[in-house]
C-alpha cells in the first residue's frame, strides 16, 4: 500500500498546490493519506480530501484517510461530510 502525507498547512491559500500534489500521488497508486502533519487547516482541507477520494474512486480504488485531526473531523461533522471521509468500496 502506497501512502503519502499532507503538509502541515492545508488552507485556501495552499489548497490548489496540495490538490495537485495529492492527485499525482493517487495517479501513481497511493491508497492512503496520512494527516498527521496537518496542524493548520480550514474548510478547504475538506474539499481537497474529498477531491482526492473522488480521484481514487475513479481509479477503482478507495483512499484511506488516517490520523485526521480532531478539529478537522469536527468541521467535517458540522458540514455533514464526515461519512464521506471514510473509505468507500471500489466500484468496478
Image: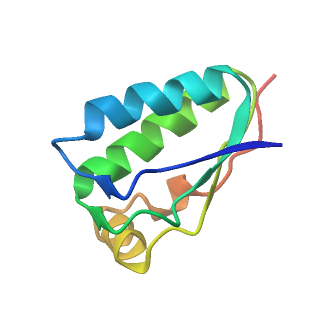
Total tally of numbered discs in the picture: 0
> Which residue is at the far left?
13
Say whether residue 32 is left or right of residue 51: right
Please name the residue shown 69% across and 46% down the image: 88
The answer to whether residue 33 is above or below residue 35 is above
Rendering coords of residue 57 (x, y %): 65, 30
The answer to whether residue 79 is above or below residue 63 is below
Say whether residue 15 is left or right of residue 26: left
Rendering coords of residue 5 (x, y %): 55, 50
Display coloring: rainbow
Quadrant of the rendered image containing residue 41:
bottom left
The answer to whether residue 36 is above or below residue 30 is below
Say whether residue 22 is left or right of residue 71: right
The one of 27 and 77 positioned closer to us in this rendering: 27
Rendering coords of residue 81 (x, y %): 41, 57
Q: Quadrant of the image for the N terminus?
A: top right
Say whether residue 25 is left or right of residue 80: right
Q: Quadrant of the image for the C terminus?
A: top right
Please name the residue shown 34% across and 43% down the image: 47
Rendering coords of residue 45 (x, y %): 33, 51
Please name the residue shown 53% across and 55% down the image: 85
Quadrant of the rendered image containing residue 27:
top right
The one of 92 and 31 positioned closer to us in this rendering: 31
Please name the residue shown 63% across and 30% down the image: 56
Amino acid at each position: 500500500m502506497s501512502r503519502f502525507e499532507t503538509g502541515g498547512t492545508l488552507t485556501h491559500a495552499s489548497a490548489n498546490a496540495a490538490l495537485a500534489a495529492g492527485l499525482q500521488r493517487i495517479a501513481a497508486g497511493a491508497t492512503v493519506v496520512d494527516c498527521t502533519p496537518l496542524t493548520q487547516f480550514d474548510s478547504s482541507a475538506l474539499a481537497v480530501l474529498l477531491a482526492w477520494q473522488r480521484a481514487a474512486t475513479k481509479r477503482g480504488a478507495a483512499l484511506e484517510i488516517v490520523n485526521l485531526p480532531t478539529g478537522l473531523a469536527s468541521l467535517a461533522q458540522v458540514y455533514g461530510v464526515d461519512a464521506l471521509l471514510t473509505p468507500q468500496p471500489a466500484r468496478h
